[in-house]
Amino acid sequence: MGDYLVLFPLIVPLFFAILSLFAWRAITWQRVLAVAGTLILFSSGLALLDVVTREGIRTVQIGNWPPPYGISLVVDAFSALMVVIAGGLAVLIAIFSLGSMDEARLRYGFYPLFFVLLMGVCGAFITGDIFNLYVWFEVMLMASFVLIALGGERAQLEGALKYVILNLLSSALFLSATAVLYSLTGTLNMADLSIRLRTTIAPDLVTTVAVMYLIAFSIKAAVFPLFFWLPASYHTPPVTVTALFSGLLTKVGVYALIRVFTLLFLADVAFTHTLILVLGGFTMVTGVLGAAAQYDIRRLLSFHIISQIGYLLMGLGLFSQPALAATLYFMAHVIIAKAVLFLIAEVMYRMGGSFDLRHLGGFYQAYPWLALGFLLPALSLAGIPPLSGFFGKLALVQAGLAQGQFGIVSVSLAVSLLTLFSMTKIWNEGFWKPAPKELRPLSGSMGQRVALILPIALMGLITLGLGLGAEPVYAFAEQAAAQLLDPGAYVAAVIGGLP
Amino acid sequence: MRGRSEILATAARYLMPLLIVFSIFLLLRGHNEIGGGFVGGLVASVAIVLYMLAEGVQAARDLLKIEPRLLIAIGLLVALSSAMLAWMVNQPFMTGLWWKHPLPVVGKVGTPLVFDLGVYLTVMGTTLMILFTLAED
C-alpha cells in the first residue's frame, strides 16, 4: 500500500483538477469537489506520514525505470510532514473559499487552478530528482501566475507582473544551475548526485553551483535581499489566494533549500551554511522593519512572511539536529499561523470595509471572538508561551546557544520583540481603538458565514494544539531532522532499494 | 473579421482531412520515431484553426462540436488512466504495458500510446481554447 500512497499527493489533486474542469459551469459541484478533494489529499498525507514513520523512507520508480535513469519519487519524514501541512492548509482554505471567493473568479477556473497549484506543491515535496523538482516548480508557478492575475483588476495585474518576472528569473537560474550540475556529474537523481558530489573533482565549481541554487531558491522563498517582489504582489489578489500563497509557495522555496543543502551541497558547509545563517538574520530584520512602516494589513503581514522565513533559514544555517528539528516544527507553526492572520484580515475587511488599519477599529468591543481568533496566532507568531511559536523559537534559540552562535540568537530575539510590537500595532489600531465608522455584521447566508469563521477557529485551535502538544510534534520533527542529517539513508533507500 | 475568402475556404476543405490524417500518423509513430502526441495535437489544431480562419470562429466551434476545455479534461483523464493501468498488474506507476500482438498499420499498441493520445487531446484543447478566445476578442 505504501507505494500507492507515495503517488497519492500527485494523483489526487490532478484527478480533482480534471473533475473540476468537467464541472466548469456547475459551481456548486466545484465547491463540493474542492472540499472533498482537499480532505482526501489531507488524509492520504496522514496515511503516508504514518507509513513513513513506521517503515522509513518510501520510494517509487516511475515507469519502473531503475535509478538513476528514471525519475524517483522519495518520501521521507520531512516530505510527508510537508504534504500533511499542505493538505491541511488546503482543506481550511477550500472551506474558507466557499464563503469568500466571488462568483466571477469561480466561473473562470479558480478551483481547477487551486488543484493544479496543490499538485505542483506536493510534487515538489515528493520528488527525488532535481530536474523533476524544477518541473514541479513550474507547474506550481504556472498555476500561481494565473491565480494571482485572475480577476484582472488593475492592481492585480501590476502585482502579477512583478511576481511573474522575478519568478521567471529565479526559474532561469534554477535551470542553469541544474545544467551545470548535470554537466559536472552526469546525473539528475538527487540520491545519485549526493554520492557523486562527495567525490567530485571540482569542489569550487560545486560551491558555485550551490550558491546559484541558493539564489534561485532564495528568490522563491523571499529571502533577503531578493524578497521585494513579495510585498509588491501578495496584497493584490483576493485574500484567499494570498493566504494559500503565503502558506505554500515561499515554503516550497524553503523546502527546496533544506533539501539541497542537507542532501547535495555538503562539501563546504562552513561557507554555504554560514552564508545561509547570515542571510537568515538579515531576512528576519528587514522583514520585521519593513512591516513597521505598513498600515495595510495585507502588506504588513506580507512583510511578516519574509521575517518568519528568516527563522526557517536560521535552523538550516545552524545545521545541527536540534536546529533542523526546530525549523521543521517552526514550519508547521508558521504556515498555519500566517494563513489564519490573512483570513482574519479578510473578515475584518468584510466588516470594516477596509484593509487599512487607520480606517479600522472597534473589533474587540463588537466582536470579541474575532479578537480572540486574532490574538492566538498573533501572539504565537511573536513567540508568547504556551503557543506554538514560543516552542519553535525556544528550540531555535537553544540550538543556536548550544553552538555558540550568539549573534544570530540575539538577532532572533530582538526580531521576536519587534514582531510583538507589530502585532500590538494591529491590535491597537484594528481591535482596541474605537471604530471610526460603524462595523457591519458579516453578510451572506448562514453557510457562508460558517465557511468564513470555521477555518479561523480551526487554525486557532491548531496553533494552540501545536503549542500545548509540542512534545509529540517536536519528537517527530527530531526524527525527521535526524533523517535529513543522514543522506546515506536517503541514498540507500533510492539506489539500494531496487527490487 | 474580413469577408470570407473563397480560395481559403476551398483550400481549407481539402487540407483539413489531410492534416487530420497526418496528425494521427504523427501520433501513432510517436513512441519510437519523430512525432508523438504533442506535435500531433498541434497539427490537428492547425486543421481546425485553418477552418476557423476561412469560416469564422463560430463555424469552427460548431465543427468541433465539443468544448476545447472538455478536450483538455478528457485528455488529462486519458493520460492519467493510462499511467494508472500499471497498478492493475502490480507494476510501479506509469510502467509501459504492451499488447503482445502488433496490429496491422498501427503497429505495437500499449499504454504509452494511450498516454500520447491523452497528450494529443490536451494539446489540441489548449491550443484551440487559446486561439478561439483570441479570435473572439
Image (cartoon, helix red, strand yellow):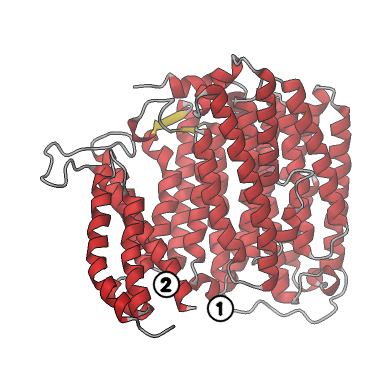
The numbered mark 2 sits on a residue in which chain? B
Residue A169: where, in percent of width, then height?
66, 47
Q: Residue at 81% of width from left, 33% of height from top? A: A278
Question: What amino acid type is highlighted by mark number 2?
Answer: Phe
Q: Secondary structure at mark 2?
A: helix
Quadrant including the C terminus of chain A = top left
Residue A299: where, in percent of width, then height?
77, 61
Q: Residue at 39% of width from left, 54% of height from top? A: A15
- Badge 1 vs badge 2, beta-carbon distance below 8 Å: no
> Mark 2 — residue?
B132
Residue found farthest to the front:
B7
When asked about the image quadrant of residue A97, the answer is bottom right
Question: What amino acid type is highlighted by mark number 1?
Answer: Ser
Q: Residue at 76% of width from left, 34% of height from top? A: A314
Residue A492: where, in percent of width, then height?
48, 19
Mark 1 Cα shell of 10 Å, populated few (<14), some (14-19), many (≥20):
few
Q: Secondary structure at mark 1?
A: loop
The numbered mark 1 sits on a residue in which chain? A
When asked about the image quadrant of residue A211, the answer is top right
Residue found farthest to the bottom:
B3
Quadrant including the N terminus of chain A = top left
> Mark 1 — residue?
A445
